Amino acid sequence: MSSTASRQMTRAESGDGAPFRAGFDAARAGRRAECDGGAAVAGTRFAGRQFFAGTLTGDYRDFGDYPWRWYLMNSLSHAPQGYPHATVWCEAGSLEIEEDPGGE
């Protein structure tokens, strides 16, 4: 059984118009994780690294026909100075999920 079996996948559209499929991965919900990525540096043509730590909600979005998966993180314990949001979307390949204390 897939992790999405209990939740219907739906096609939706993000704020920037890019289509995605939303889903939920119960195995990742509540897991502590870290991710890093990049963002534009205001007033330049450059990007800088950004580091986040928090708890995965289990919600994800798949973009494209060959899914490019992003997981939603909340309860941020670390975010860049001045980061204005309570959540962040992390690209699956940039996630480091903490070991499960239960041994899973």
Image: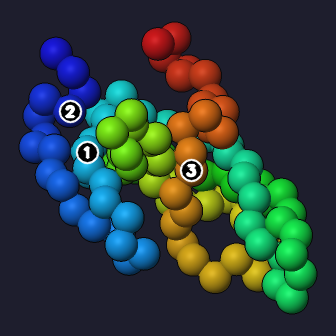
Residue at screen point 33% across, 39% down: 65
Above or below residue 67? Residue 84 is below
Circle 1 sits on which residue?
A: 23
Element on which disc 3 rests = strand
Counting the numbered discs, the total is 3
Frontmost residue, 72 versus 78: 72
- Which corner quadrant of the image does residue 1 belong to? top left
Q: Position of residue 104 (x, y in %)?
A: 47, 13
The residue where tag 3 is placed is 90
Looking at the rendered structure, the secondary structure element under dot 2 is loop
Residue 4, numbered circle: 2
* Residue 58 visible here: no
What is the x, y in percent for residue 44? 89, 81
Colour pattern of the rendering:
rainbow
In the figure, 99 relative to 64: above or below? Answer: above
Query: Mark 3: which amino acid?
Result: Cys
Label 2 Cα crowd, 10 Å radius (few <14 / some 14-19 / many 20+): few
Q: Disc 3 versus disc 1: distance between alpha carbons?
A: 14 Å
- Judge the density around disc 1: few (<14), some (14-19), many (≥20) Cα neighbours within 10 Å: many
Tag 3–tag 1 contact (CB < 8 Å): no
Where is residue 27 shown, x and y percent of the image? 36, 28
Whichever of labels 3 and 2 marks the residue nearer the N terminus, that label is: 2
Q: How far apart in space, not on screen, are marks 2 and 1 (Cα)? A: 6 Å
Depth check: give the residue in front, 54 or 43.
43
Where in the figure is residue 64, as x and y percent of width and height?
37, 45
User: Upstream in the sequence, badge 3 or badge 1?
Assistant: 1
Query: In the image, is 61 to the left or to the right of 84?
Result: left
The amino acid marked with disc number 1 is: Gly
Q: Is residue 97 left or right of residue 13?
A: right
Q: Please report the residue visible at 86 percent of the width from the left and 75 percent of the height from the top.
A: 45
Kind of residue sitting beneath label 2: Thr
Labels 2 & 1 near each other (Cβ < 8 A)? yes
